[in-house]
Image (tube, helix red, strand yellow):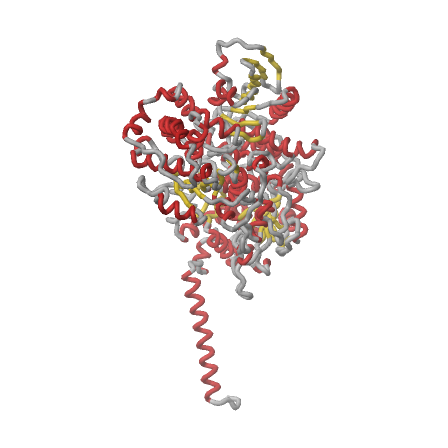
Amino acid sequence: MNGSSPNTVNSMTLNLSNDYLDKKRKKIEISRNNTPSPKEIKKMKFGRLDQVEEDASLQEFINSNTFPTIKFQDAYQFYLQNLNIELLESDKLFPWLHEYERNDHELSLDDLLKFKQSHTMILKSRYVLHDEVTGESYIENSGVLKGSINLKILFHHMDDGDSLDTLKTTLSDEINFYNREMYQLGLPKNLIQDDDVIESIFNACKFNNILPILKTRQLNQSSLSYYSSATKHIDPSSYRKFDFQCCKMLLLSSRALIYCNHKDVLECTVCKGARHLISLVYYNTISKLKTFGDITDITIFKKTLLKVSIVDEFVNEIDNEFVGIPLLPTDALQKPEHQLVSKFDTYIINNWEKDFLYRERLEMSRISSNSPMNANLWIGNSIDFEVSHMGLVLRKSFDEVNTFYQDNTICLLDKLDPLEVNDMQIFNYPQCLWDLFIHCKPFVGNNEEMFESKTALKAKLNNDEKIYFNFPASGTLGLGNLTLYLIKNIFQCIDYIHQITTKLNKKALIFAYDGYSESSFLILAYTIYSKQLTLKEAILYVHKELKRPFFVFPNDLEVLNYLQILLLSKAKERIDYEEDTTQVINERFEITNVDFTNMFFNTSIVPNIKSDLDCMMNLKGPLPSQILEYLYLGSLKHAESFNLLKDMNINCVVSVGEKLTILQGREYESCTIQKGNNRKLVIYKIDGITIYHIDKLLDNGHDPLLDSLYEILGFIESFRKSNKNAKILVHCMVGVSRSATVVIAEVMKELKISLVRAYLYVRVRRLNIIIQPTLLFMYELLKFEEKLQNISDVPIKGIQEGCKRSIDWVSLCSSIDELNEYYLNPTN
């Protein structure tokens, strides 16, 4: 054989055999991956429609408006365009954005279509976690463009019970429907029949674990079809359907841009599949829901054409204005020694469109960071504990330290340099080195030890060793689980803290994970004991004098209400020990059965003990949340507690849509009625408190707030100018939607910051209560941001130069939904 030796022939035969085996292996791998076979793909088609009569002019129109790829810089211009589109008035979009389709409100299609021509969706098709060529691994949440969302957000996810057969069946149905629509339009070249295209769509769905159906509707799981949209019933939960907004805005987009971090993105099969998938679901959805009418009408089809393109590259430059977070290797997660912030953390902090939960926790660590109860005893959070053990201290005098001031926030941060050490810009460093640490945490049982034996404590104190106590977290104690043993330990722990910080002049830190709720029981108990104050007085003292954010659980109020009797009685006896100057700690008091019984029956030691408890339990908190030095956010119950308002020096109440029943039958010092924008504004003055009431403003997803918002903010400004010591409470029914919207706007105006920054600023300070302005109110706040940017004499922090807004509606809603999902479904 051409001079070849037998060995050569055998070798060639062997090679052919290996090629054959390789093909077999690949086939097996494909089978294992459940990729549809060619036969299955053919079953998924509507059928070969080769005889369709082509509408040449329409096909030419589509061809001239089809751009498979787009340059990176051109994509950036579309992002900027999104931030500068003139937002429609709210009545043009609502209630349509609430998710339901048919209602008594007529949509203006001309307005929607005009907006649609300027809006672009930017979608990330996949995360690249590993580079097979270089072996480099990447951080999952890196490589993100500004103004973009994850593709999978748009779709119904495949549940655990869904098989890939479900995906195949659903995709087949959607392709069939799409092909029928294109057939009627006379567009044979647009039919989805190519095997590679179908397979790419399937793989894009499989990769992202999604079904090819948008979240514009709840799914009927039995048929995987849309529920009927004929009903006019409005589900109140739809007023906060932030997860549906991205889908709704896809329907209001003229372009969709697909990208990923693949080095050769134009060869990325997931991006190719995503491009076809978006076209498929877009046309199917607007056709099924008849959003813009019948799309088989050529005029409507042309007006609603969606151009889907793949961004030709991901420019991975750290200073590129379009890159929210560059693609970073996993070593960017590493924190240098004695530092809390990694390089990746810095990029997240700089990108205000994403990761609201991370930002929320950073802000909480700021407002709950170490602040003094006295010269030796401090209150803080777990970050303070961690930093103190690194030996990092930023000393200030006692009088300088105050965590409650409006500049103590990450919301005023400028862009950080990832190459610099940024810890001090993000966290408040400890103000001293502590000797004693009291960790407030959930206990496994009532018999868990809070501290070591007196002998062990004395030895550590003599050797200047650090001492660690544990204390039951707030909210974990109840009247039902109180025992004499537990009360003894609680009291002894409090008295030890008092002795170590006063008698021995040691410095101590009371800390908990969040720094404001789990430690509140101990803080109040210690205040009662050390200052000899009643529970009510202690609550006001911590707020007014210590300026400390805290939240008290109802069961804590019940326990403290009785424990204060023991603490106050022993505090009076403590004077007998004050003359003892020996530098040792002692068990100064024996808590007996009589003491334990007197806690519940010797109520004469605290005047008004029952009425005070009833009042505090009714208020649930029990104080309104302080947002700015002059501004509080609370509920109707707070507003109707005139005695509490006076105790807190609050001299003005803004009632957003809720009238105070306490005003009925009372004489006013004055009453002024004004005519606002379709609403009556009434200003009362009673018992030295000014009450500004706006009527006809319900939290129903329909009543707009924007016009009244300008009037409310104007009133707040004028009241502050005429009252040097203005303290203003803004409330609605609960203090989470209408009044929260007003307070967010006031924070934007006062601090000159963007909507996202103000939203997080207020959300964190509304302790243990999640603010939830409706979709309508958040949309109006976005329009308010436009107005603020236009009239402000200084730049609004967070808004890019040359832009009307800091964020687009799609990014805002997806990030709020992600944040809310953590609290609603933390296991996800």
Please state if 425 lies on the left or on the right of 445 as rendered: right
Residue under the image location 48 percent in, 55 percent down: 203
Q: Is residue 605 above or below residue 388?
A: above
400 and 113: which one is in front?
A: 400
716 and 86: which one is in front?
A: 716
Residue 313 showing in the rendered view: yes
The extreme left residue here reads 593
Location of residue 776 in the rendering, given as x and y in whole percent from the top left corner:
55, 31
Q: Is residue 640 above or below residue 99?
A: above
Location of residue 118 in the rendering, given as x and y in whole percent from the top left corner:
65, 41
Q: Is residue 617 above or below residue 141?
A: above
Location of residue 102 in the rendering, given as x and y in whole percent from the top left corner:
50, 31
Please state if 427 lies on the left or on the right of 77 as rendered: left
450 and 312: which one is in front?
A: 450
The extreme right residue here reads 793
Location of residue 819 in the rendering, given as x and y in whole percent from the top left corner:
50, 41
